[in-house]
Image (tube, helix red, strand yellow):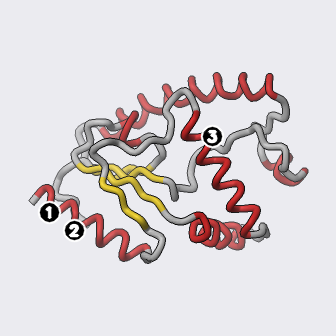
């Protein structure tokens, strides 16, 4: 959809992109083998966090360069606060943990993997906690972001809601 020629950012708690915290004691051997960045001890976690900070700084520059002089929709946990703090319209997307876990379960099933809802809820809570408390680029709601609770909305309803908000704000 045409977003009225303006920059538009989407940031929120339901995104599934990004790297997970590596201070996980409950990862299975399968997950450890699949995750080349697995780091089991506190010393490694600190090294990992420093590495992530450097990666994030580089990625911010790349993201800004890609979006420069063009209209775009961008999603991520620090898009509205760190990457594009001056975006004209920002959304902070939230949903109940049960719903997020069920959505994530569908993603895993498509990959042929199985996890329990309880396991996924725990992972989501841990990721939210880690992302909210990290020193660099923490997950925060921008002061000027519109919060969208997607718990009871389909993807189409979410997009339509946000599109209407953009039209209302930008005319």
- Residue 36 sits in quarter: top right
Residue density around tag 1, few if under 14, some if 14–19, many if 20 or more, within 10 Å: few
Location of residue 74 in the rendering, given as x and y in whole percent from the top left corner: 38, 50
At horizontal 25% and vertical 66% (from top left) the residue drawn is 163
Determine whether, in the image, residue 102 is placed left or right of residue 137: right
The label on residue 70 is none
Q: Earlier in the sequence, mark 2 or mark 3?
A: 3
Q: Earlier in the sequence, mark 1 or mark 3?
A: 3
Q: Nearer the viewer, mark 2 or mark 3?
A: 3
Q: Nearer the viewer, mark 1 or mark 3?
A: 3
Quadrant where the N terminus sits is bottom left
Judge by depth and name the residue closer to the eye, 125 or 60. Answer: 125
| On screen, residue 54 above or below 73 | above
Residue density around tag 2, few if under 14, some if 14–19, many if 20 or more, within 10 Å: few
Determine whether, in the image, residue 60 is placed left or right of residue 24: left
Residue assigned mark 3? 130
Asked which secondary structure carries label 2, the reply is helix
């Amino acid at each position: 959809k045409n977003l009225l020629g303006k920059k538009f950012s989407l940031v929120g708690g339901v995104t599934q992109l990004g790297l997970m915290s590596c201070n996980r004691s409950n990862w299975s051997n399968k997950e450890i083998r699949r995750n080349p960045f697995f780091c089991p001890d506190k010393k490694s976690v600190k090294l990992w966090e420093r590495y992530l900070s450097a990666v994030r700084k580089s990625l911010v520059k790349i993201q800004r360069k890609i979006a420069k002089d063009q209209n775009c929709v961008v999603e991520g946990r620090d898009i509205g606060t760190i990457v594009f703090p001056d975006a004209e319209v920002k959304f902070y997307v939230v949903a109940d943990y049960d719903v997020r876990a069920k959505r994530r379960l569908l993603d895993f099933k498509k990959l042929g993997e199985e996890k329990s809802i309880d396991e996924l809820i725990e992972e989501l809570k841990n990721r939210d906690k880690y992302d909210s408390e990290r020193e660099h680029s923490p997950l925060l709601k921008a002061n000027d972001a519109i919060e969208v609770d997607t718990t009871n909305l389909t993807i189409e309803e979410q997009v339509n809601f946000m599109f209407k908000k953009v039209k209302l704000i930008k005319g």
